[in-house]
Structures are given as C-alpha cells and as structure tokens.
Image (tube, helix red, strand yellow):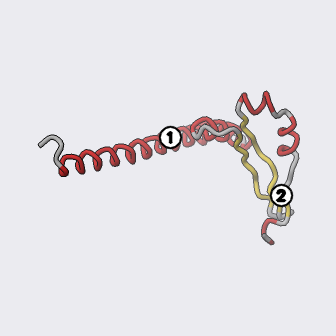
Amino acid sequence: MANSPETKQLAEKIYQQNIELAAKNETLSLFKKLYQISTLTLTPEEMASQIADIIRKELTTELVGIFVFEKETDALSPLAFSKSDALIKNLNKLESIFENTKIIDNSKR
C-alpha cells in the first residue's frame, strides 16, 4: 500500500505544491524587503541602490542595474547598480561601461 500508484501520485503532488509555496514565500519576502526600503529611504538614488542590492542578492545574480526614463531626452539614464564581489574583483572596467551609458531613442524602439 505504501508504494501504490495513488500514494506515489499524492506524494508528487504534495512535493510540487511545496516547491510552488517556497517560490511564493521567497517572492513575498523580496516584496517585503523592497517595501521596507521604499518607506525608509529619502532619495531616488538611495532607494534604487538599496533595491538593486536586494534584487541582486535575492536572485543571486552578478549585476543589477536600475535606469530612469527621461521623457525630455527620450533616454534611459543609469540610476543605480549593484555588483557582486566577484564581478567587482574580476571586471573593474564594467563599472565605467554601464554607469556612464545612456540608452537613447527609447520610444522609437
């Protein structure tokens, strides 16, 4: 009875639901951190910097960049970047590549 097809199906279904629940919990945890930052910071730059750090750490990525859209110039301008220690150590040139780059003619693309 312990190895019946019904038992196996039930175990697989519970396992899948646990995976989905874990993903939802991680997402909610990330949203909670982002909300706390948005209520505690004063400037857009500070908020963007902290948000980029949290997203990079939570999603375990090497680089997160936040740009601001400037309607007058139709450009995305860098606001904040978060880089992992490994990226900083190995790719020091990357900072100057991204942090001084505007993305222009956005509405045309």
Residue nearest the observer in this picture, 45 or 11: 11
What secondary structure is found at the residue carrying circle 2? strand
Q: Are marks 1 and 2 in contact (CB under 8 Å)?
A: no
- Residue shown at 69% from the left, 38% from the top: 62
Farthest residue to the left: give it: 1
Residue nearest the observer in this picture, 69 or 53: 53
**Residue 104 drawn at (x, y percent):** 85, 61
Q: Which residue is mark 1?
A: 32
Q: Is residue 11 above or below residue 107?
A: above
Quadrant position of residue 107? bottom right
Q: CA distance from mark 1 to mark 2?
A: 30 Å
> Quick one: label 2, few (<14), some, or many (20+) residues within 10 Å?
few
Q: Is residue 43 left or right of residue 73?
A: left
**Residue 32 drawn at (x, y percent):** 50, 40
Residue 20 is labelled as: none
Number of numbered callouts drawn: 2
Quadrant position of residue 54? top right
Which one is earlier in the sequence, the residue at label 1 or at label 2? 1
Q: Which residue is mark 2?
A: 103
Residue type highlighted by circle 2: Ile
- Residue shown at 86% from the left, 63% from the top: 73
Residue type highlighted by circle 1: Lys
Q: Is residue 44 left or right of residue 94?
A: left
